[in-house]
Image (cartoon, rainbow, N blue to C red):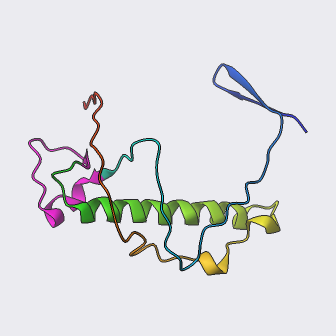
């Protein structure tokens, strides 16, 4: 089945879809390596809690090496939890319910303490325009 969609003025076609069968170890430590930088945005409400005093009154900042690692970890855990729940809620609430997308009970995770060990390699920067 070929699916065609238009986004703005661009037209795309999906020729096929394959379900990945990735097994994530349960209760067994494993290593997660990213090929691209992890970007963590920190909302203004968390500045004071973590002792962050920005030069300007920004609504958010991006995590940097001088910020507490706990803040980085909590933001990542919160993001994973949010995406996990959004993904499964999307399929649970869909009228075209698909049994392949039932929330796995063994992975109804608490994302707290998800990471045990970190190795910081480098901080990268890009041009950021804030208005």
Q: Is residue 77 left or right of residue 19?
A: left
Residue drawn at x 40%, y 69% is 115
Q: Is residue 49 left or right of residue 6?
A: left
- Total labels: the figure holds 0
Asked whether residue 44 is drawn in magenta, I would say: yes
- Residue 104, relative to residue 17: is it above or below? below
Q: Nearer the viewer, residue 76 or 121?
A: 121
Quadrant, the C terminus: top left
Q: Which of the 4 image quadrants contains residue 129?
A: top left
- Residue 2, relative to residue 44: is it above or below? above
Q: Nearer the viewer, residue 52 or 8?
A: 52
Q: Which of the 4 image quadrants contains residue 7?
A: top right
Q: Residue furthest top?
A: 9
Residue 41 rendering spot, x and y as whole percentages: 32, 49
Q: Nearer the viewer, residue 2 or 27?
A: 27
Residue 76 rendering spot, x and y as whole percentages: 39, 60
Residue drawn at x 36%, y 46% is 39
Asked whether residue 125 is drawn in magenta, I would say: no
Residue 80 rendering spot, x and y as whole percentages: 48, 62
Residue drawn at x 91%, y 39% is 1
Q: Is residue 73 left or right of residue 1?
A: left
Q: Residue furthest right?
A: 1
Residue 125 rendering spot, x and y as whole percentages: 27, 34
The stretch of residues the image draws in magenta is 42-63
- Residue 30, relative to residue 67: is it above or below? below
């Amino acid at each position: 089945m070929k699916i065609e969609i238009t986004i703005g003025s661009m037209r795309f076609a999906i020729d096929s879809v394959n379900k990945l069968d990735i097994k994530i170890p349960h209760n067994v430590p494993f290593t997660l390596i990213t090929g691209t930088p992890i970007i963590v945005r920190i909302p203004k409400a968390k500045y004071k809690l973590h002792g962050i005093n920005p030069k300007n009154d920004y609504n958010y900042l991006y995590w940097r090496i001088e910020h507490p690692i706990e803040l980085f970890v909590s933001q990542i855990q919160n993001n994973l939890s949010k995406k996990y729940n959004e993904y499964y809620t999307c399929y649970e609430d869909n009228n075209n319910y698909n049994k392949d997308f039932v929330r796995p009970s063994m992975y109804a995770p608490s994302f707290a303490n998800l990471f045990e060990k970190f190795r910081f390699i480098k901080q990268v920067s890009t041009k950021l325009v804030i208005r």
